[in-house]
Image (tube, helix red, strand yellow):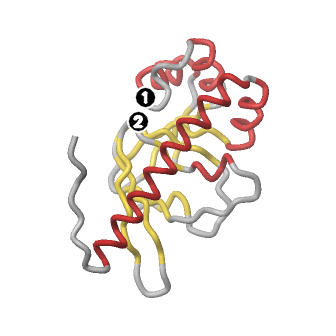
Amino acid sequence: MTHNRGHMAQVEELRAHKFTSDLAPDQIASLASLADRVEFEPDELILLDGQRSTAFYLVTSGSVVVELCAPHYTVTIEAVGTGRVFGWSSLLDQHDTLFQVRARERTTALRLEGGALKALCRADPALGSEILRRTLQVVAGRVKATELRFAEMCGVRVTAPRG
């Protein structure tokens, strides 16, 4: 993983990112002040299941896979591409990751250190409320993806919802 920092570039990337694009300009500026641009190589392990998650990532190009690891196999739960996020457990106190995250290809992301992001959310309750709401949507999506993968593994035919 390589790091790069440049505040104005982070502002532009946050304005363009699906997770943050409609936040107020001052909120985006606050987040940009915490953001480091990072790059991952194909197959690079970013998070290991069971380790303490310390950062929240907004994928800006490429993609990663979220995997569930067992002693004798690894199951891909979902792919997370441009405009999506991972590392939500870094926003919780003393919480280990539940999944492994690995780069599928060369991937860039904005990395927000979890402790600093939590402090910013406490200092700016309106921003904190938005980050919490959006993160809960991510968590709900991850639960649904996990449910679908287990249904497939159990031989249950799953069809995509209409609409």
* Disc sitting over residue 145 in the figure: none
Indicate the quadrant where residue 3 lies.
Answer: top right
Q: Is residue 83 rendered to the left or right of residue 113?
A: left
Tell me which residue sits at (49%, 21%) in the image.
9
Secondary structure at badge 1 equals loop
Indicate the quadrant where residue 163 lies.
Answer: top left
Residue assigned mark 1? 17
* Residue 81 coordinates in the image, percent (x, y): 35, 45
Tell me which residue sits at (46%, 44%) in the image.
39
Residue assigned mark 2? 60
Tell me which residue sits at (65%, 50%) in the image.
90
* Residue 127 coordinates in the image, percent (x, y): 65, 25
Mark 1 and mark 2: Cα distance apart in space = 7 Å
126 or 61, which is in the foreground?
A: 126
* Residue 36 coordinates in the image, percent (x, y): 58, 35
Secondary structure at badge 2 equals strand
25 or 160, which is in the foreground?
A: 160
